[in-house]
Amino acid sequence: MKITALSEKEIELLARLEYEGREIYTRNEITSFCKNKKMANYLIKKMLEKRRLKKVIKNIYILIPMKAPHGKWVVNEYLVAKALARKADYYIGYASVFNSYGFTDQVSQMIYIVNNTYSFAKTIFGVRYKLKKVLSNRLYGLEKRKIGKEEVVFPKKERAIIDVFEFYDVKRAFQILQSQLNLIDKNIFIEYLSRYPVQIIRRRIGYLLEQLGVNKKLLKGIKVGKKGYSPLYKDHPKRGELNDRWRIIVNG
């Protein structure tokens, strides 16, 4: 598709944004490079029309640099994910990181952004993004990775394994846990599990860790409550042997 020629002011702004070396900018950041807000609004409008900026969400834009052939450009999907999270606390998680940690051979076709503010889905440049809203008490065990000139938040491996039990059925999650158990720091994993706010997940993983022979002293700090029992497998009939330590119905 033909790209309309830029004016002198538009070229000047585009050059400045390229000099800054980032792929995504907010409206306020672009305004700071302009003479005033009115000029910034005008230039943003024209550069959107001429496909040198692409709107991610309100007031956040992807820069399409001059070197992009015919205006075609591939932006790093993790930087887009960070932009979608805006000022929320977040991490790039679930299937988006499972392959990179060796949990599965499958490469996710969706970028999941776990955060404490937003819940919606959006497709940008053909990439699908899904924001999942959770309580802030799940946002721990994280690390920052440098991508370009920005830092993006991901879960550490031990934290990501807990999310396996939120994302997959228990049988598949157990296979992953079993394959990774000797490749992770068990102390850190159990510390993260002890903090996890979903009781049924603590019960299931605690029970399975014991079945895998993890030292009972190491598992001692995992609290599972004193009321009721949870099924080990959610899609099976809730009948089976009762495990009092983990408050689990072994139903499969």
Image (cartoon, rainbow, N blue to C red):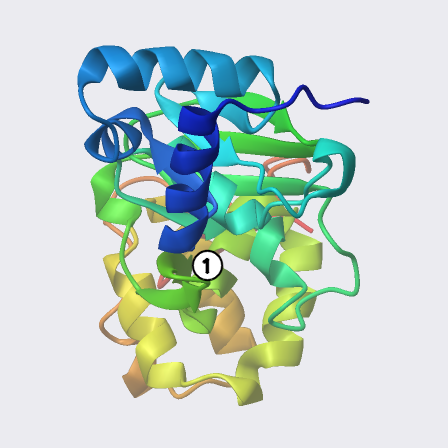
- 46 to 70, vertically: above or below: above
Q: Within the image, what quadrant is residue 192 found in? A: bottom left
Q: Can residue 223 be seen at all in this image of the molecule?
A: no
The x and y percentages for residue 93 are: 49, 51
Q: Within the image, what quadrant is residue 69 found in? A: top right
Q: Quadrant of the N terminus?
A: top right
Question: Which residue carries the number 1 mark?
Answer: 162
Q: Nearer the viewer, residue 183 or 198?
A: 183
Q: How many marks?
A: 1
The x and y percentages for residue 204 are: 48, 56
The residue at 37%/37% (across/down) is 25
The residue at 60%/38% (across/down) is 234
| In this picture, residue 239 sits left or right of residue 185 | right
Task: Kindly state the secondary structure of the residue where label 1 is placed.
Answer: helix
The x and y percentages for residue 51 are: 61, 23
User: What amino acid does circle 1 point to?
Assistant: Ile
The residue at 40%/26% (across/down) is 9
- 9 to 37, vertically: above or below: below
- 39 to 108, vertically: above or below: above
| In this picture, residue 203 sits left or right of residue 249 | left
The residue at 57%/29% (across/down) is 52
The x and y percentages for residue 148 are: 46, 62
